[in-house]
Image: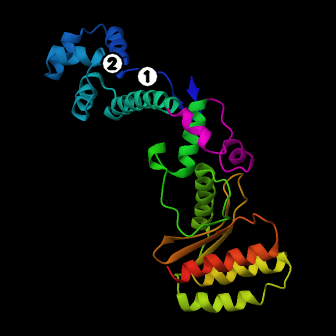
Amino acid sequence: MTTNAGHRPWSDLAIPPGELLEEELSARGMAQHDLAVRMGRPAQAINEIVRGKKRITDDTALGLEKVLGIPAHLWVSLEASYQLTKAQQREIADLESQEQWLKEFPVHDMERLGWIRVMQSPSEVVREVLSFFGVASFDAWRTTVAGFRITPGTKVSAGALAAWMRRGELAGLDMATRPYRADLFREALAAIRSLTVEPVDVFVPRMRELCAEAGVALAFVPELPDSAACGCARWLAKDKALIALSLRYKTNDHLWFSFFHEAAHVLKH
């Protein structure tokens, strides 16, 4: 029985390796006491392993290999799988306890745009949202937002804004750029100004190319309801900047204003 957790299935039954050890001893007609004597270990220690109260250490696994002929790495793997399964069971309970946080984020829009996978159970949705932000808990997702422009008086959802910015960050991280140089970026901006009269299918790829050559990743990220951001500027690394644009108003004038506004943030750090 398996549960989908990313790309790697895992057993949702926490079977202590001691149960398998007990079955092996029973099949051989060997008592726990006999195994303890052969391994030079206290009988209580073997009993605790059988009952799942004590872990199989590397040394114990090597001892079992000598006595039973079953490779040590199998015992170590069984123990690791058992401990991981118990941790994953605890995690599910923890994720379910964080379900109330989902209302802070536009989950359905994020699924529609393909930013996160469509999941069934609440715990899976929580895990997917946390993985999207690259954090282990919702207490960690709040970060300082740099250089975003929001229309005054606009209703803003902190979760939608954070999701939009994170999508821009991920897109920027995937883009190949040269190391940032302010002089080259100024030259790029001069060249980009001449593109403002060109159609979108001409200026967009050329903008990205010129920005990348100067060390700036340019990402166009679909707007999320209540995210309210027109653009964002931030540093992805000491030599790589990001400009993300939402195309919120879907007009060239707003696009160019937002782009040059964020470009100024990059130049002024």
Q: Nearer the viewer, residue 250 or 61?
A: 250
Check residue 118 for magenta coloring. Answer: yes
Label 1 secondary element = loop
Q: CA distance from mark 2 to mark 1?
A: 11 Å
- Position of 196 with respect to 260 (left or right) is right
Q: Which residue does the image show at 58% across and 51% down from the upper left?
A: 158
Place residue 241 in its image quadrant. bottom right
Q: Nearer the viewer, residue 231 or 210?
A: 231
Q: Mark 1 Cα within 10 Å, few/some/many (few <14, many 20+)? A: some
Residue under label 1, please give it. 14
Question: In the picture, which quadrant includes the N terminus?
Answer: top right
The percent coordinates of residue 113 (x first, y second) are: 73, 51
Numbered circle sitting on residue 247: none
Q: Which residue does the image show at 74% across and 88% down from the upper left?
A: 193
- Position of 253 with respect to 129 (left or right) is right
Q: Nearer the viewer, residue 154 or 176?
A: 154
Check residue 57 for magenta coloring. Answer: no
Mark nearer the viewer, 2 or 1: 1
- The residue furthest front is 153
Please report the bounds of the magenta region as a residue range.
Answer: 98-121
- Position of 69 with respect to 254 (left or right) is left
The percent coordinates of residue 99 (x first, y second) are: 55, 33
- The answer to whether residue 6 is seen in the rendering is no
Residue under label 2, please give it. 18
Q: Which residue does the image show at 75% across and 73% down from the upper left?
A: 255
Looking at numbered disc 2 in the image, what kind of residue is underneath it? Gly
Place residue 101 in its image quadrant. top right
Q: Is residue 215 above or below residue 188?
A: above
Q: Is residue 212 above or below residue 159?
A: below
Label 2 secondary element = helix
